[in-house]
């Protein structure tokens, strides 16, 4: 059996008397698109925090690329290629799309942001940035200040910046939140275009996006996994339909 890229086993996280995650186990293969769904309060955001290193577990282990990363910080995990998008992307509103993505390229190369004034003249940064800008469909806005972008385009910019760090696994927490129908369709198209290029874990309430994108789906309810499998199996699971999907 091929070892999973990410493997979490028996994760526990309590806040007082509340078990936000209760013995949660999940794994993600290389190039797999894995969605986590569940009602509000199911523990999804806690889970993604535990996987990214933003939150420390009360019990259990997280392994990435064959090594335990349970005790590593979010920064150390990102350096290894385990990236939570918004944790490594901070859009600078007065900078253009190209300049924002160039900053992410620069960070991946290990250079300090403090030399950005010189980096503006570095054509190699711009050329590398344009690759990711084109990949997520923002070429027409490359020289647009980030603050002038529509919400959906800003989320695409965040994704471009995340991809510019060359992640092995990308953790996405509700990338379609706040989007219009057209913006959501555009984001689904973008995510479909990068499927299989890297591992992706997606938390999302938009079920049309989940079933269009996911190779596997894990369902959380009250901090516990009640089902995990291929989309067709999840859609037809009576427990899942009763707890979340409905009729």
Image (cartoon, rainbow, N blue to C red):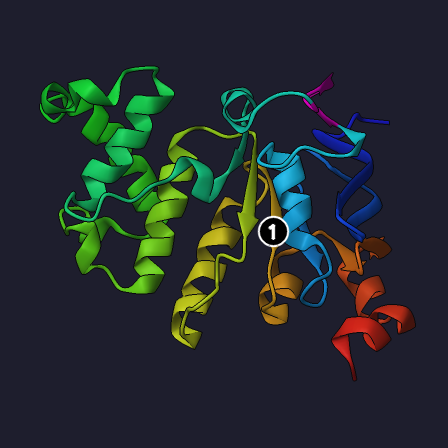
Count every numbered label the image shows and give the total: 1
Q: Nearer the viewer, residue 11 or 140?
A: 11
Q: Nearer the viewer, residue 123 or 9?
A: 9
The residue indicated by pointer 1 is: 202
**Residue 48 seen in the figure:** yes
Furthest-front residue in this view: 16
**Rendered position, 186 above or below 136:** below
Residue 116 lies, in percent from the top left, at: 16, 24
**Rendered position, 110 above or below 182:** above
Question: Is residue 9 left or right of 207 when viewed as pictured?
Answer: right
**Rendered position, 41 above or below 43:** below
In this picture, which residue range is highlighted in magenta?
62-70
Query: Could you say which quadrant of the image residue 124 lies in?
Result: top left
Q: Quick one: quadrant of the N terminus?
A: top right
Residue visible at 67% across and 32% down in the picture: 56
Residue 45 lies, in percent from the top left, at: 63, 51
Label 1 crowd (10 A; few <14 / some 14-19 / many >=20): many
**Residue 31 seen in the figure:** no
Query: Could you say which quadrant of the image residue 95 lies in?
Result: top left
């Amino acid at each position: 059996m091929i070892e999973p890229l990410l493997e979490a086993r028996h994760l526990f996280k309590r806040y007082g008397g509340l078990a936000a995650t209760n013995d949660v186990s999940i794994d993600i293969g290389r190039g797999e698109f894995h969605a986590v769904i569940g009602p509000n309060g199911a523990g999804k955001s806690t889970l993604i925090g535990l996987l990214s290193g933003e939150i420390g577990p009360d019990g259990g282990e997280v392994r990435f690329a064959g090594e335990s990363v349970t005790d590593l910080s979010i920064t150390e995990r990102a350096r290894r290629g385990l990236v939570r998008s918004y944790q490594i992307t901070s859009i600078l509103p007065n900078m253009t799309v190209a300049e924002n993505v160039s900053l992410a390229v620069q960070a991946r190369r290990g250079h300090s942001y403090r030399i950005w004034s010189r980096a503006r003249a570095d054509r190699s940064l711009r050329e590398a940035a344009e690759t990711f800008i084109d990949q997520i469909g923002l070429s027409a806005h490359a020289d647009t200040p980030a603050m002038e972008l529509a919400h959906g385009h800003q989320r695409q910019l965040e994704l471009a910046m995340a991809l510019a760090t060359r992640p092995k696994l990308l953790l996405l927490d509700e990338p379609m939140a706040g989007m219009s129908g057209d913006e959501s369709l555009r984001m689904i198209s973008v995510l479909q275009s990068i499927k299989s290029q890297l591992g992706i874990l997606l938390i999302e309430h938009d079920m049309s996006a989940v079933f269009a994108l996911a190779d596997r789906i894990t369902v959380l309810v009250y901090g516990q996994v009640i089902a995990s499998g291929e989309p067709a199996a999840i859609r037809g699971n009576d427990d899942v339909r009763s707890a979340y999907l409905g009729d």
